Amino acid sequence: MSGSVNKVILVGNLGRDPETRRTGAGDPVVSFSLATTESWRDKASGERKDRTEWHNIVIFNENLGRIAEQYCKKGSKVYLEGQLQTREYTDRDGNQRKATEVVLQRFRGELTLLDSRGRGDSFDSDRAGGGETSPSPSFGRSSPMERRPAAAPGGRIADVIDDDIPF
């Protein structure tokens, strides 16, 4: 295989409010933690069990960062797409450390608010234009799983569905 893929898709809840810092050039960097929880029933005991994984999220995209700052709070459910990156740093005690993070780059990544008044607004960095400051339905794209047909004037969704199915 000649190429490779580094893509992470997560659906989870924010573990803390987004925090914004600035780079030396003044660009915003938004970070927060995201919890994903897996649930299952233990076959032996019949007991329900959970396992929660915590992910460090870093947003370098100014528009997505602004959306995260304004609309995401601790406990908010979000869908996001980013890339895994590992960085090395020296802690306060002089020890070398490594941190693996899910990064939404300046021109890559997606952030969808899943519990934003039930709307499922999506903010896609490929479509996030320069001057947009507030979300609108045309700002991003929604996932195909979240799209719902528009109701007909009579209010019935069935009236909108086309019966000319080719198979």
Image (cartoon, rainbow, N blue to C red):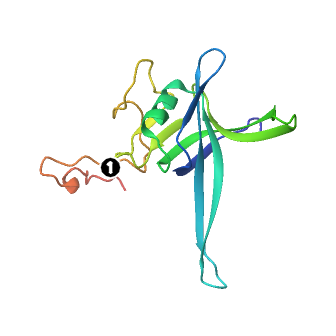
Indicate the amino acid at tag 1: Arg
Q: Which quadrant does the C terminus fall into?
A: bottom left
Q: 119 or 73, which is in the foreground?
A: 73
Residue at 65%, 51% (x, y): give it.
54
Q: Residues within 10 Å of mark 1 (few under 14, many from 20)?
A: few
Q: How many marks?
A: 1
Residue at 17 percent of width and 48 percent of height: 152
Q: Quadrant of residue 140?
A: top left
Q: Quadrant of the N terminus?
A: top right
Image position of 133 (left or right of 88):
left
Rendered image quadrant of residue 138: top left
Q: Which residue is mark 1?
A: 148
The residue most toward the right is 95
Q: Position of residue 48 (x, y in %)?
A: 58, 76
Q: Position of residue 67 (x, y in %)?
A: 45, 33
Residue occupying the far bottom of the picture: 45
* Percent of width and height locating residue 43: 64, 82
Above or below: residue 44 compared with residue 165? below
The kind of secondary structure element at disc 1 is loop
